[in-house]
Amino acid sequence: MIKGSCLCRNVTYDISGDVGDIVHCHCITCRKAHGAAFSSVASVPLINFQLTGEEKLSSFESSPGKVRHFCGNCGTQIYAIREGASHIILRLGSLDDDITSKEISHIWTSQKANWYSINKELTEHLESD
Ligand SMILES: [Zn+2]
Ligand SMILES: [Zn+2]
């Protein structure tokens, strides 16, 4: 079982089975929704995704038929789903547990922020700097 939650922990979920391959989405709606350079996502079959706390769950239809679900209290993006789809698009930043999925691609780079470079080697810091 893989667990996830929002920042204020009002929204919580369990995933049974595996999380799909990881994609980093640079589209403008992901950038706005997440307040970030891109959104890291993976597919999870709807039947394997179980909300265990959803009182504060809110949603926004960001494009026709695509609904983004997030915590209405703290704002954490949790998942998106397309109308009629049998899988959700999980927002990986909301995971509490490690996963074994592999990164496979960057998508919507035509809308990438001009201040972010995908392949630039930057120094890494274990904490803030
Ligand atoms: Zn929350
Ligand atoms: Zn996107």
Image (spheres, helix red, strand yellow):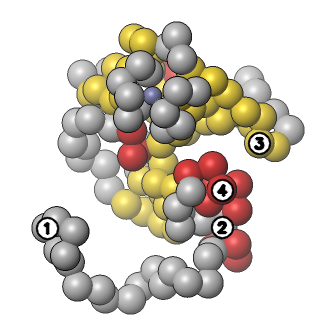
Q: Amino acid at mark 4?
A: Lys
Point 33% across, 29% down: residue: 4
Circles 3 and 1, Cβ within 8 Å, touching? The answer is no
Q: SS for tag 1?
A: loop
User: In the image, is 37 to the left or to the right of 85?
Assistant: left
Name above or below for residue 91 compared with residue 107: above
Does residue 118 show up? Answer: yes
Q: Amino acid at mark 3?
A: Ser
Q: How many marks?
A: 4
Residue receiving disc 2: 108
Q: Give the distance between the C-alpha atoms of the residues marked 2 and 3, in whole angstroms.
A: 16 Å
Q: SS for tag 3?
A: strand
Quarter of the image holding residue 66? top right
Tell me the mark number nearer the camera, choosing from 1 and 2. Answer: 1
Name above or below for residue 44 compared with residue 38: above
Q: Position of residue 124 (x, y in %)?
A: 20, 78
Tell me the mark number nearer the camera, choosing from 3 and 1. Answer: 1
Residue receiving disc 4: 32
Please report whichever mark, 2 or 4, sits nearer to the chain's N-terminal start: 4
Q: Amino acid at mark 1?
A: Leu
User: In the image, is 85 to the left or to the right of 97?
Assistant: right
Name above or below for residue 93 compared with residue 5: below
Residue receiving disc 3: 62
Q: Give the distance between the C-alpha atoms of the residues marked 3 and 1, in whole angstroms.
A: 35 Å
Point 56% across, 57% down: residue: 35
Q: Position of residue 61 (x, y in %)?
A: 77, 35
Tag of residue 126: 1
Quarter of the image where ligand 1 sits: top left
Q: Give the distance between the C-alpha atoms of the residues marked 1 and 4, in whole angstroms.
A: 27 Å
